[in-house]
Amino acid sequence: MPKSPDRLRLASYNLHKCRGMTGPHAPERNLRVIAELDADVIALQEVDFRFGARPEALPRKLIEKTTGMVPAPFLGTGENSLGWHGQTILLRPELRDKAEIRRLPLPGIEPRGALVLRLPGLTVVAVHLGLMRSSRRAQLSRIIAQSRRIGHDRMALTGDFNEWHDSRGLEALEALRVITPGPSWPAPFPRLRYDRFAVSRSIEVLDCGVLDNEMARAASDHLPVWADLAVDAHEEVPRGYQPARVTSRIPGEDGAAGAD
């Protein structure tokens, strides 16, 4: 659908390695779901297989043809990986020239990391938080502590929070507005609100929801979530905004295994 200049649709979707609930591997279903979301920016989780060289589970050669979107440019976990720690961000091609992306290592028992996409009107932080609440708290605290350095004052955090509680474990996000569109897991009979947004209070959330249809329930164990934000990713760069170069390698992180 046509977008007005001040409306940006942000989405998040855990692909579950494109296996549905139990298999087989069928990425064409996930690509159809992504296309139906009609997002400007989408954070994806579990885009790579978990073991060995962690090759891509979502074929990159089909992404633009099927969805009209392109992956944000960064080096993944390995030569054949689409993501870093299983994550990638897709965006509209017209946003790519103004986008900067970097990787942010996160603490915790499992190896985890966030992706930071910086656009002139918005900083998007894509996450797949840990399985233990203590790790999730530490990971969110790290992101908030780094927020001034990684972007400007319009930030949207999104992804699979792995947190079923509506407030417990999210204490570090007190300065942001937490948006939970609805139950998104497990996809065939969604009950838990794992997939969320947390946005700066200066950002107006125009609408939000969960994409729940027959295809989405078959394509992954998560349903995708979306939020329409009143921001313009094409606007002039805010005062004080210092774009970072694209970070392709992080000292000490080369060769580190990702977690799903």
Image (spheres, rainbow, N blue to C red):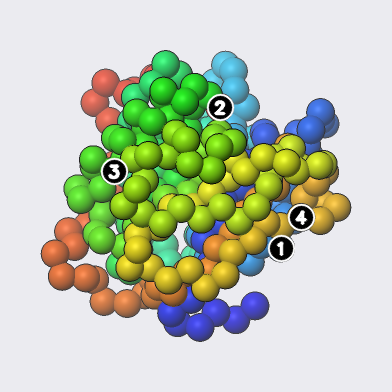
The answer to whether one can see residue 94 in this image is: no
The quarter in which the N terminus is drawn is bottom right
Q: CA distance from mark 4 to mark 2?
A: 23 Å
Q: Secondary structure at mark 2?
A: loop
Circle 1: residue type: Glu
Q: Which residue is mark 2?
A: 260
Horizontal and vertical percent position of residue 209: 64, 61
Residue occupying the point 42% across, 16% down: 109
Circle 2: residue type: Asp
Circle 3: residue type: Ile
Mark 3 Cα within 10 Å, few/some/many (few <14, many 20+)? some
Mark 3 or mark 4, which has the lower sequence index? 3
Q: Secondary structure at mark 4?
A: loop
Mark 4 or mark 1, which has the lower sequence index? 1
Q: Residue furthest right?
A: 214
Q: CA distance from mark 4 to mark 1?
A: 11 Å
Q: CA distance from mark 1 to mark 2?
A: 25 Å
Residue occupying the point 26% across, 48% down: 147
